[in-house]
């Protein structure tokens, strides 16, 4: 016992000695800092007090000041956290181009897969559905369902394309070109901007029209039918696709006029419009969901611009009798359009992530969310076609763009003779091959992204119903409404003000960080926003405190199912 007591006494003495040494070193550092400040203050006082004295003393004080300025130093490690954060921001900005282009490349091939589906597999699916309509009654299979819901949607898409193409055949492209070319430069610039806004508005509302048509046509009989029948919905869909295709046609014609202008002033003004987009989006507050919407719209915009450039090249090559030399005349302008688009996207996303303190890893989450759509559409319990899923996610509706491309190709390329038909058949088989290979590669890559994001369990979740989502939102609103009076009552009973309660939470960072809340809809996000990091639980009262105000739960990336024109604005 005596040995143990002596050992404890020696340990306590050692601890006291260590504490005394630490206090001595801290006091010494503080004394050095005070001496430096006193020297500086003394220098100023000395300078002020020697104004009336001899010149040699003033010269000495000036020399001392100069030598102090030349030899003084500072240590960046005293504020290590600040400089480390600044360095990480620089590294994030340098990573943005690579991560963004990965997302853009993946999204481009998703749009390409959806676009090729309209030309390759959709006609074959429509033919198979029509054959089923003819053969099922003849075989006496009256008890079975005539067409599956997916086949009904395919037949409707095919009929919409045929009717709209017949309507587009009456539109004179040459007359439209000369009508637009006769306008002044400033008018064409305004027209092009108006067309871009109108295209976004059409895209945001067009998929709703098509979804309403598909659901009205395939809705079960035991459910309550819609007040408007299938035929009015079908006519609305035909009108929408025709008007949207006509809008894109005017947009392509305006771009063609800019390419063919002599001084290229219109093309320069139109390209400068991309840099105005930086001003409109960089200095706004963005969260992850808003940045995801903007990234999807950028993917859709880039793919649409590529198709517009293809249409412009086809029209110009037709006018010059398919002379290959003329293509190299157009190539610098095409390269300028593509380069400006890529540069604007990189600069815009780099500064948005910098100002909003968003990590570059978020683009990997966006890529995994897009991959989840592709994988889930291949499941047996899939509730939507993949092309429709991409349309809802990105606002990219392939029917109007495909209709316009078919109209331009059929008017630019003349098919005569059996050899021409053989070339068309070979081209069609090549498109089918490209579609199949692209789908296989995308499916394998998407499965890899889903596994990396650990989202396999969500593939087997049932789709959320309208009633359940409404009930959850009402429950969350009721919970948030009841939280504020309870917090006031408990704070009054405890005699602690809300501000002091918040300070108590900040005094315990370890316990607060261990109780960060995550809603069910945010389980997919691997990195938390600052607003989510501020949401903690008061361990004493068991109540939820969300900073100074309560916030509604954020949406999951998988719940953002349509492109909105104001998706990147936060009021």
Image: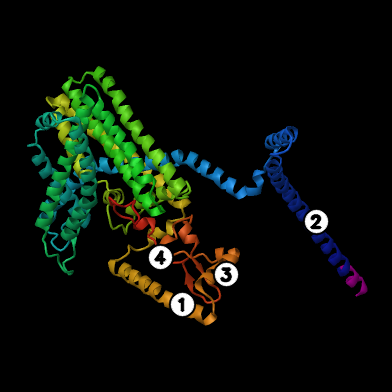
Q: Are marks 2 and 1 in contact (CB under 8 Å)?
A: no
Of badges 2 and 4, nearer the viewer stands 2
| Residue underneath mark 2 | 24
Which of the marked residues, 1 or 4, is nearer the chain's N terminus?
Answer: 1
Which of the marked residues, 2 or 3, is nearer the chain's N terminus?
Answer: 2
Measure the C-alpha gap from mark 3 to mark 4: 21 Å
Q: Which residues are magenta?
A: 1-7
Measure the C-alpha gap from mark 1 to mark 3: 16 Å
Of badges 1 and 4, nearer the viewer stands 1
Q: Secondary structure at mark 2?
A: helix
| Residue underneath mark 4 | 551
Measure the C-alpha gap from mark 2 to mark 3: 32 Å
| Residue underneath mark 1 | 488
Q: Secondary structure at mark 3?
A: helix
Asked if the stretch drawn in magenta spans residue 549, the answer is: no
Crowd band around label 3 with a 10 angstrom C-alpha radius: few (<14), some (14–19), many (20+): few
Measure the C-alpha gap from mark 2 to mark 4: 49 Å
| Residue underneath mark 3 | 504
Report the magenta stretch's main SS: helix
Q: Secondary structure at mark 4?
A: loop
Asked if the stretch drawn in magenta spans residue 5, the answer is: yes
Q: Are marks 2 and 3 in contact (CB under 8 Å)?
A: no
């Amino acid at each position: 016992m005596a040995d143990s007591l002596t050992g404890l006494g020696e340990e306590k003495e050692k601890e006291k000695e260590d504490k005394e040494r630490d206090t001595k070193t801290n006091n010494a550092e503080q004394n050095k800092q005070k001496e430096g400040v006193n020297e500086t203050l003394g220098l100023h006082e000395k300078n002020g007090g020697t104004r009336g004295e001899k010149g040699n003393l003033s010269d000495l004080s000036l020399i001392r000041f100069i030598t102090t300025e030349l030899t003084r130093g500072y240590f960046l490690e005293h504020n290590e956290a600040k400089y480390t954060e600044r360095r990480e921001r620089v590294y994030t900005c340098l990573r943005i181009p690579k991560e963004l282009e990965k997302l853009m490349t993946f999204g481009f091939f998703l749009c390409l897969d959806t676009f090729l589906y309209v030309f390759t597999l959709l006609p074959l699916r429509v033919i198979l559905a029509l054959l089923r309509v003819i053969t099922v009654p003849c075989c006496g299979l009256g008890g079975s369902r005539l067409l599956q819901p997916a086949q009904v949607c395919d037949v409707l898409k095919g009929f919409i394309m045929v009717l709209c193409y017949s309507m587009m055949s009456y539109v004179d492209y040459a007359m439209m070109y000369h009508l637009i070319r006769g306008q002044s430069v400033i008018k064409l610039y305004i027209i092009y901007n108006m067309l871009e806004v109108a295209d976004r508005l059409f895209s945001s509302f067009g998929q709703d029209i098509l979804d309403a048509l598909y659901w009205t046509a395939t809705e079960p009989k035991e459910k309550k039918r819609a007040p408007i029948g299938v035929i009015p919905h079908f006519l609305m869909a035909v009108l929408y696709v025709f008007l949207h295709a006509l809008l894109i046609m005017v947009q392509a014609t305006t771009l063609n006029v800019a390419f063919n202008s002599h001084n290229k002033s219109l093309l320069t003004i139109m390209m400068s419009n991309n840099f105005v987009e930086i001003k409109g989006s960089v200095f706004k507050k963005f969260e992850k969901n808003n940045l995801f919407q903007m990234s999807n719209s950028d993917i859709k915009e880039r793919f649409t611009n590529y198709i517009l450039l293809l249409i412009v090249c086809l029209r110009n090559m037709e006018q010059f009798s398919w002379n290959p030399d003329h293509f190299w005349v157009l190539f610098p302008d095409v390269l300028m359009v593509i380069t400006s688009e890529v540069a604007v996207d990189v600069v815009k996303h780099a500064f948005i992530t910098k100002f909003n303190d968003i990590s570059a890893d978020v683009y990997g989450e966006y890529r995994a969310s897009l991959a989840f759509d592709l994988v889930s559409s291949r499941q047996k319990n899939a509730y939507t076609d993949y092309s429709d899923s991409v349309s809802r996610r990105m606002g990219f509706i392939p029917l109007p763009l495909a209709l316009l491309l078919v109209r331009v190709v059929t008017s630019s390329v003349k098919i005569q003779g059996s050899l021409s038909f053989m070339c068309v058949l070979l081209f069609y088989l090549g498109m089918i091959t490209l579609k199949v290979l692209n789908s296989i590669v995308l499916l394998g890559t998407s499965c890899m992204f889903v596994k990396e994001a650990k989202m396999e369990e969500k593939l087997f979740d049932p789709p959320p119903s309208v009633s359940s989502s409404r009930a959850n939102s009402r429950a969350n609103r009721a919970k948030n409404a009841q939280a504020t009076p309870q917090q006031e009552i408990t704070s009054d009973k405890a005699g602690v003000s809300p501000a002091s309660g918040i300070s108590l939470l900040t005094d315990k960072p370890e316990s607060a960080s261990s109780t960060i809340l995550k809603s069910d809809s945010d389980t997919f996000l691997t990195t938390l926003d600052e607003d989510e990091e501020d949401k903690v639980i008061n361990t004493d009262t068991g109540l939820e405190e969300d900073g100074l105000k309560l916030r509604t739960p954020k949406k999951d990336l998988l719940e953002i199912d349509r492109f909105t024109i104001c998706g990147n604005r936060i009021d």
